[in-house]
Amino acid sequence: MKKFSEWFHNILEEAELIDSRYPIKGMSVWLPRGFQIRKYALKALQELLDKDHEEVLFPMLIPESELAKEAIHVKGFEDEVYWVTKGGKRDLNEQLALRPTSETSMYPMFSLWVRSHMDLPIKVYQTVNTFRYETKHTRPLIRVREITTFNETHTVHATEEEAEEEVKTGIEIYKTFFDELGIPYSISKRPEWDKFPGSKYTMAFDMIMPDGKTLQIGTVHNLGTTFAKTFDIEFENDEGEHEYAHQTCYGLSDRVIAALISAHGDEKGLQLPPVVAPEQVVIVPIIFKENQDVVLNFTDNLEKLLKSNGIRVRQDKRDMRPGKKYYEWEKRGVPLRIEVGPRDIENKSIVLIRRDTGNKEFIDYDENTIADVVRDTLDNITEDMKVSANKFQEEKTYSVENLEQVKKTINKKGGIVTFNWCGDTDCGKDMEEKFDIDVLGTQEADVSGPCLNCGKEAHYKALISKTY
Ligand code: A5A
Ligand code: MG
Ligand code: ZN
């Protein structure tokens, strides 16, 4: 694969996903094909969230007085906030922030909603746009200034245990979601200096991109009682005493689509898992003048049959060379192509070509079973794409035994390097500087012996990498 960032920009254009020529830095246009992928990805996510959470929608503007209330939180975002200062020609009495995330928009309302333990838990989510004036290099989908697809869940609980449980639930939901999309990940607890501003701790999902750098594709935060104290979210317990509520929040963004593209795409272009593909199957009739009717009769019938079985199918009848059509649909990532020519119809067979393996399969045509055959093939594609993407992440995760190897591995191979670590902030920051990497975080492990960097006792597995 040529240089990743060039490949990535090309694919957005060639597969007609995003037009990044919008005249504001860090903001782009979702094109119809990209928007459909986004829609199907959100559908899969919402199906998981809806089991135990309710969808809501809060305003996009936040009064400065609310945004400023939580000191640590606001400090984390102050350099990234866009402000609305005027209504028409008049200065506003109070300037309004475009939400960079929605804690300070939601929590003053939560404070009104929570009176007694009967009002708990609250478990809501919304999918909105948020704005962050990012100063690092912006890239479409990966680091944007308008996050157009910010899916954020916010929960409020009576006890610390319940909040801990919700963190686990959030992690499980994201695991299932990423698995459905065949997006690989490593989960770790972010170090103290890199946790979500105002949180107790942050659990993060990171995917290794094709160039070996990692991308944070989702985060789950335990907020403890910090925001509850700031925004006065308290309830009366059984004994009639007032207690502060325990909160969590977790979020995903457009980055999920970037991860999807990067995990599966190749030199031919996009490659989509069936669950998010606008067309799961494309039928290409091979037409010659003399038998056009026979072929089209057959393919029209096949199209109808698959459609009625809930498969997203499209027939490409355009008057152009089949080879050109194949090339186009491969570039757009359609998981399965069906070719039908006059010979095939005579032989009562059709040809299935998988986008992921390029594998060509001649199958006997039977109206009664064809939908099942196609569905099974799509399921196999889903599974194989996941396995192959996970393999890449595993192969690029290196466990090392000494400091020399840490440096060598990161610089030569990229990916994630793991090793025994003490967990101390000083030691971590020292490594980040020395090796020009980021400490992604820690995983609990049965660790003994010294920290590879400082020699003190090790308590965790550290995960480090170069990051986006
Ligand atoms: N309220 C919580 C959920 C929150 O805001 N968490 S977060 O800051 O970590 O953002 C959630 C996710 O959004 C991140 O894990 C990251 O994957 C994504 N994200 C953050 N900034 C982004 C940006 N500028 N462009 C695209 N995605 C971004
Ligand atoms: Mg850092
Ligand atoms: Zn150490």
Image (tube, rainbow, N blue to C red):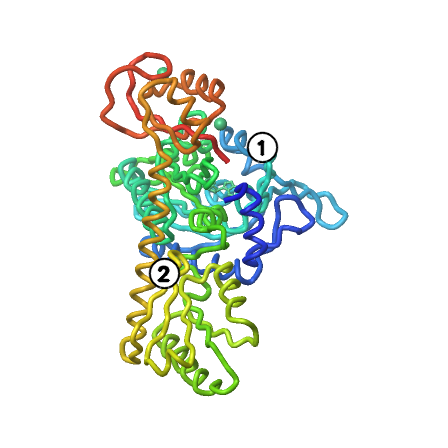
Asked if the residue under mark 1 is in contact with the one under mark 2, i.e. CB atoms within 8 Å, the reply is no
- Determine the residue positioned at 37% across, 49% down: 178
- Determine the residue positioned at 49% across, 48% down: 258
Above or below for 381 versus 456: below
Quadrant housing residue 243: top left
Q: Secondary structure at mark 1?
A: helix
- Which residue is outermost to the right? 89
| Residue situated in front as seen by the camera: 43 or 465 | 465
Q: Amino acid at mark 2?
A: Asn
Q: Secondary structure at mark 2?
A: loop
Q: What residue is shown with label 1?
A: 78
| Residue situated in front as seen by the camera: 463 or 151 | 463
Quadrant housing residue 218: top left
Determine whether the beta carbon of the residue marked 2 sits less than 8 angstroms from the nearest atom of ligand 1. Answer: no
| Residue situated in front as seen by the camera: 186 or 281 | 281
Q: What residue is shown with label 2?
A: 359
